[in-house]
Image (cartoon, rainbow, N blue to C red):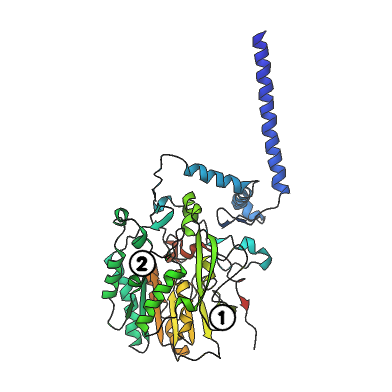
Amino acid sequence: MMAKKRNTARRKLALINVVAFATVLMLGGVLFFVLPKQSVSEFEKRRLSPVPQFSWKELLHGKYIDSLELYVSDNFPMREQLVEISFRMKESRGIKNKEITFYAATDIRKPKKKVENVKVDAKDSAKQDSVIIEGEGEEVNNLFIFEGAAMEIFGGNNKMAQSYAAAINKYEQELQGKVNVYAVMIPSSIEFNAPSEYRKMSVSQRTNIQTAYNSMLPGVRKVDAYGSIAEHQREYCYYRTDHHWTGRGAFYAYTAFCNSAGFTPVPLTNMERKTKTNFLGSLYWLTRDSRLKERADTVEYFKIPGKYTATVFPKGSKKGMRGTIYYETKGSYGNYGVFLGGDWPLMKIERDAAEPKTGRNAILVKNSYGNPFATYLPSHFDKVFVVDYRYYEGSLLDLIATEGVTDLIFINGVFSANTSWHINMVTKVMKGTGPRKSNDSNSKKQQVRDSALAPIRKDSAAIPEKKG
């Protein structure tokens, strides 16, 4: 009798399990079709797979089913919350040292695919601000987190430093003293912020920079950004959650540049200081380490006095659009992209007609690391052309000739200056790269990140330039 009751209880329990499981599946299916779909993942900082377009050809080759699976997996109900829970569970596994955690490059999450020049309607700005793009040619480096600050471990060498110097020397040789050529190499946070017992894991950046400078021709003006930042290393010169430096760090490099160029730098007290809070940068999104989230950064920027107009040229377009030195949106975005509004192939900043003329025009050749530095230069030049060598397809020599450029400035973080892809692109942009295909073998070989994690807002960040 007891056995019969137990069997009956088991059957009832099994039936309840089946009904409950089927109910959850049905409810999930209904919610999948009823709930509105997101186009981006806030937590993963990427675009979600769209509804695939049906075609018999895609179906026969199996591509349609694959795309449909991606769409369903990217859009199931409560996906965002479940993904975040999964990351938190992974983070809590094992025994951890609360003081320091190491991340190998192979273990760091990388963006899934590259997206460029995506046009987003202004009404969709919240979604737009959440998306990341991969910059070209950037490697994901080993890093460690100490007291809530992430630092990349530098592994450059003398050979790469000399290769970077050789690239700069080519410009000095080509221009033959007709244009002032500057080299600005920027150290990263580990050089100053790592405790002494961990600093030895990283190659000396001071030595690497000095090796590069010693290998440059005498005519190249070597800017001692390292020394200037070192004098202020206790200040907020680097982000805790991002691989870039801050507006304040860039200011101290700018003062070093002024010493080399013969300018008097505009003091910070003469600039308007503004901030954006709760910035979580690239190194947080790569690791999702909760200690970084607890110490979110503040983006500090300083607005130079005077009036200036900016024109930006998107990739693949010869038509200029009105830009801005400071991209100050009121939406969720407004972090590192506050500097120049992001990475444009070419940006032209002109001094207002009412401002006194300097008789000098400059080109700043940079990647995203140079963006905050660029915001200080218009104080000293009639025109500043900001060229991102990763995307600009024109010739620097042509730009120098047509615009009467007097000063050519190369700025790179020490990681980029020790990466062959960047050195290659700095060399190629001298005479122009021409249209580059998205499957360029050089960029395919590189692990990408850098501005890599800059939100997509390029076209909507600018206003089409008015005729006349």
Q: Is residue 37 left or right of residue 434?
A: right
Q: In which quarter of the image is residue 238?
A: bottom left
Q: Quadrant of residue 46?
A: bottom right
Sequence-first disc among 1 and 2: 2
Amino acid type assigned to the residue bearing label 1 in the image = Thr
Label 2 environment density (alpha carbons within 10 Å; few <14, some 14–19, many ≥20): many
Q: Is mark 1 on a helix, strand or loop?
A: strand
Q: Is residue 350 above or below residue 365?
A: below
Q: Which of 446 and 306 is in front in this view?
A: 306
Q: Is residue 29 left or right of residue 224?
A: right
Residue at image coords 48%, 82%: 378
Q: Which is in the foreground here, disc 1 or disc 2?
A: 2
Q: In this view, does 115 lie to the left or right of 218?
A: right
Furthest-front residue in view?
Answer: 269
Q: Is residue 65 above or below residue 13?
A: below
Q: Is residue 452 above or below residue 107?
A: below
Residue 246 point in image, percent of width and height: 45, 67
Residue 434 point in image, percent of width and height: 47, 77
**Label 1: which residue?**
311
Q: Distance between the residues labelled 1 and 2?
A: 30 Å
**Label 2: which residue?**
187
Q: Is mark 2 on a helix, strand or loop?
A: loop
Residue at image coords 62%, 71%: 460
Q: Does any portion of residue 354 appear in the rendered image?
A: yes
Q: In which quarter of the image is residue 196?
A: bottom left
Residue 179 point in image, percent of width and height: 37, 87
